Amino acid sequence: MAEQDEIRSLIDGERGAWQGFLKRYAPVIYGAIQKRLVPAGRAAEAEDVAQDVFVRICNNDFRLLRTYDPQKARFTTWLTVIATSAAIDHLRRGNKPNTPIDDVPEGKLAVPGKEPAWIKIPEGLLSPRQSLVLKLLYDKDLEVADVARLLNVDPQTVRSMHHKALTRLRAHFASDGSPAPGGTGAGDK
């Protein structure tokens, strides 16, 4: 029953409840994580995964913690399952240890120079305003709000013109057999 009282105190946000929880159960969580990460050679990532477990437990007003049922398992068993699942998820995502950017050779960060393949948009396919919206968004790299201010229209109008222009372009390039923007041909889906 003491565990139930601790859980209730934690959910109710009582002072010191979180510190008490960490002191008592962090070793259980950390141990379960280590059992999965050490054999994978990723023990150094255990703290990150433990933080993920703590976030999972606290999210949405302790929603996950509220699902604990003492009739089904001991609290430490339940925490071990949560921690093990988080460690497995971490390994499946293939998260690699973070290397500080200053330690990465510049050659690995460089992007090979390549001129973009410009697409010739046929005259009359887009309205003058649609063409202008695309130029402002893509060529000038402006935000929707900035384009809306320049054109003295609502941002939703800019989004709508942008969407309609892209729809027309996709339909045109899909129907004439030319490579679609970002694709390799009309058969791309």
Image: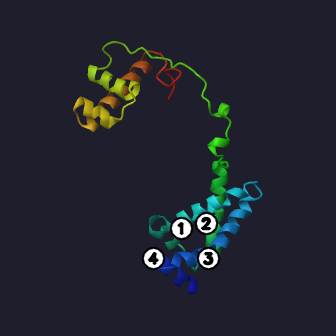
Is the residue under label 3 in contact with that under label 4 (CB below 8 Å)? no
Residue identifier under label 2: 82
Query: Please, what is the three-letter code of the amino acid marked with disc 2?
Result: Ile
Badge 2 crowding class, 10 Å Cα cut-off, few under 14, some 14 to 19, many 20 or more, is: some
Q: Where is the N terminus found, in terms of image quarters?
A: bottom right
Locate residue 102 relative to residue 156 in the image: left or right. right
Locate residue 102 relative to residue 131 in the image: left or right. right
How far apart are the alpha carbons under marks 1 and 2?
9 Å
Q: Earlier in the sequence, mark 4 or mark 1?
A: 4
Residue identifier under label 3: 23
Nearer to us of marks 4 and 2 is 4
How far apart are the alpha carbons under marks 4 and 3?
16 Å
> Residue 155 at what x, y percent from top left?
28, 37
Badge 1 crowding class, 10 Å Cα cut-off, few under 14, some 14 to 19, many 20 or more, is: some
How far apart are the alpha carbons under marks 4 and 1?
13 Å
Q: Earlier in the sequence, mark 4 or mark 3?
A: 4
- Give 19 or 70, whichever is nearer the viewer: 19
Vertical comparison of 109 with 19: above or below: above
Residue located at (57% from left, 86% from top) = 2
The chosen color scheme is rainbow
Nearer to us of marks 4 and 1 is 4
Residue located at (32% from left, 28% from top) = 164
Residue identifier under label 4: 13
| Secondary structure found at label 1 | helix
Nearer to us of marks 3 and 2 is 3
Residue identifier under label 1: 57
Is the residue under label 2 in contact with that under label 3 (CB below 8 Å)? no
Looking at this view, name the residue that lies furthest to the bottom: 1
